[in-house]
Amino acid sequence: MTTDTATPDLSTAVEAAVEAYAGDPGFLIPMLQDLQADLGYVPAEAARHMADLLHVPLSQLYSVATFYKSLSLVPRGKHLITVCLGTVCYLKGAKEVAARIESQLEVGPRMTTKDGLFTFEPVNCLGMCGLAPVMVIDDDHFTEVRPGQVPDILARYSGKEN
Ligand code: FES
């Protein structure tokens, strides 16, 4: 028996994610990933419904959702910008690249621009240290990035259709 706390669309998405793994809480991470793929993020209402269905504490679900950078509890922008702030990238100027992005887009870490176009998420080490500093937008990788390149890189996505 579960409590019906989510709206019909959210309920359907949550139930599909849970059923895909036979309701086994051991598959909480892929369930949340499926939910995120379906809804674009993990809404609080959906998280509560999933916790109810799986009989796991909501705190456990949030703990997983906040640990994994691929999961988001808030809606993300159309384009996800990731800048590595790992040690090598940091020493090679990633902090300045991140600062340029933040000032140009008027966002802080893990924030989305007012127009919903970009979400900015600093991370630690993308495994490409030899090409530091590294910046990723969606699936596009930019290496040895200098702060002065940021406006041109962002412009490619600002005018991008879909
Ligand atoms: S520290 Fe940036 S890719 Fe490893």
Image: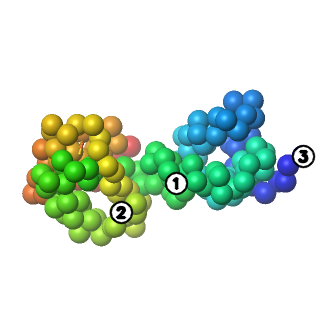
Going from the N terminus, do you reach mark 3 or mark 2 first?
Answer: 3
Q: Residue 102: which quarter of the image?
A: bottom left
Location of the C terminus (image quadrant): top left
- Crowd tier of the residue under label 2, counting other residues whose Cα lies within 10 Å: few below 14, some 14–19, many 20 or above: some
Most foreground residue, 61 or 135: 61
**Residue 139 lies in quadrant:** top left
**Which residue is depicted at the point 23% across and 59% down?**
98
Q: What x and y, as percent, mark residue 101?
A: 24, 61
Amino acid type shown at disc 1: Thr
Residue at the location (40% across, 63% down)?
111
Q: As rendered, which of 78 and 86 lies closer to the eye?
A: 86
Circle 3 residues within 10 Å: few <14, some 14–19, many ≥20: few
Q: Is mark 2 within 8 Å of ligand 1?
A: no
Q: What residue type is labelled 2?
A: Pro
- Camera-side residue: 94 or 88? 88
The residue singled out by tag 2 in the image is 109
Q: Which of pointers 1 and 2 lies earlier in the amino acid sequence? A: 1
- The residue at the point 52 percent across, 59 percent down is 74
The residue under label 1 is 66
